[in-house]
Image (tube, coloured by chain):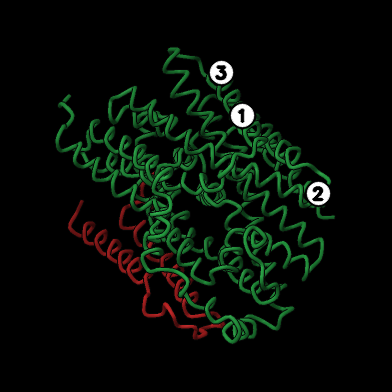
Amino acid sequence: VTVRGRKAKLAAAAALVILFAVRHDVWWWSDATLVMGMPIGLASQVLICLLAMPAFAWAAEAFGLEDEQ
Amino acid sequence: VTLAIALLSLAAVLGAGLAARRLGGRDEFFLAGRSIGPLFLLLTLFGTHMTSFALLGAAAESYRKGIGVFAMMASSSALVVPLVFLVVGVPLWRIARREGHVTPIGWLRSRFRSERFALAMVAASTALLIPYLLVGLIGAGVTLQQASGGRWPEAAGSFLVAAVIAVYVTAGGMRSTVTANALQTLFFTALGGVAVVIVLQHDGGLAATMQKLVATRPELATREGLGVLEVATWAFVPLSAAAFPHLALHWMAARSAASFRLPMVAYPALITLVWVPSVLLGLVAALELPGLTGPATNGVLVALLARHAGAWLAGLLFAGVLAAVMSSLDSQALSLGALFTHDVIRRRGGELDEARQMHLGRIGVVLVLLVTWLISLLHPVGIFRLGSWAFAGFAALAPIYIAGLHWRRASRTGAWAALGVTVVAWLVLFFGGHDAVTSARIHPAAVLTILSTLALIVGSLLRPDPQP
């Protein structure tokens, strides 16, 4: 693993850890404010799912899945 | 109309499965020639992993507890399952391709160099998978009974579904299973979106419906009904994907490591597409059909759709539920057939030629479905509770796979310790500590996984494997 490769892997892993931590958004636990037509507690979770897509694309690249046949 | 749509969907799946079959040897039958590309890998993995709970159960939970069900069950899967593909699926695919393994247990046997451990893992995986199969088959029987307005007995419906699965899985093995799953996944994923658009249009749109919810049932628009620890410990449940033999068989059927990229990236999107409509429809049902309690809440989605769109949409919903049930059942039956052939019969009875392996695999699939159907006739008490606990058992087996792939010092003793602790702790908690765990609002998957991880580490450090 090159230094650059290791850094990319760590950065992708860090992005996923942050998303996982933010998933426990206790600050909106009792908040019923509507955002984009949905309660904020649901809208925020949907946003986390959508942000997971580029994070996993990054992880797939960092771990070299694209090149391996 | 309702029954006709449901039966038509069965015929379509059967036709697709049979049309896809190809002649070939052992690897073609069990692993589709290790040739599954990204799109089909995504659709079959998602269809195999999602059950009818994502449609009916999610709406019922949302009706009872509100939006929190999405955080508890869906967003955790969206983050954990693609990670499992990367951490377990890709390395397992690499080793299976290099060493020629057909089942995940075959790799465990070679990794921990123990025939007995492999057999014990077959026994544990089968014991945990049978309740899961039972829940699906009983659900299919109930669905066809409802679709026929009560004219079809539940046993006839479940037998028909088991027979359809048996025909296409034995005819075309993994390739037929993957093709049928792809069709089923596309269908039940689109269904939720269509249903929620129709219902919300009728009610004045999403914003107006949610404003009404906040005004009349504000507790459902927040997560106040759930504990923070409850949501956190539910995140251990999707770890079970690491130890599901039916998912592992699909990973091993992938064409390349690059084939895993699309499933990893698109999985969170598919989770959102299926779960958000179910959760929203559950909330709408809470506004329109208030006061339901107990098992009656399980039918809120059917009742809501019948109210808004009549028989045809209810028929499509029944077909969607059947698709979600069958896309898991077929893969589970094929994986148990593969374990039966490669990890029990073949190991005990010596080398078999490829034709005989495929023949035994087919017998295994039919036996699994037949035995499951016969047990389903007894309607075992507490089977649904057992089904949900099966996930906890699989989650506790996940550390064995993860450590086996990534920790060189993971030893046979450590693997045995993790398996032993899982079995004992599962039995103790299921029979003796169920109330304590549920009243503490902790999912048993968290307790079991932490205990099995500790056992694996301690066992491996205390008794490393001898150097070869």
Amino acid type, label 1: Val
Mark identifier at residue B355: 3
Nearer the N terminus, badge 3 or badge 2? 2
Q: Quick check: do tags 3 and 2 share a chain?
A: yes
**Residue B113: horizontal and vertical position, in percent?**
28, 25
User: Residue beneath label 2, please?
Assistant: B150
Q: Quadrant of residue B115?
A: top left
Contact between labelled residues 1 and 3, with CB atoms less than 8 Å apart = no
**Residue B49: horizontal and vertical position, in percent?**
52, 49
Label 1: how many Cα within 10 Å (few below 14, some 14–19, many 20+): few
**Residue B81: horizontal and vertical position, in percent?**
42, 54
Mark 3 lies on a secondary structure that is helix
Looking at the rendering, in which quadrant would you find the N terminus of chain B?
bottom right
Residue drawn 37% across and 75% down? A26
User: Residue beneath label 1, please?
Assistant: B371
Figure colour of chain A = red
- Give the Cα distance between marks 1 and 2: 25 Å
- Give the Cα distance between marks 3 and 1: 24 Å
Output the letter for the chain in green.
B
Label 3: how many Cα within 10 Å (few below 14, some 14–19, many 20+): few
Q: Nearer the viewer, mark 3 or mark 1?
A: 1
Q: Chain of mark 3?
A: B
Please tell me which residue lies in front, B255 or B123: B123
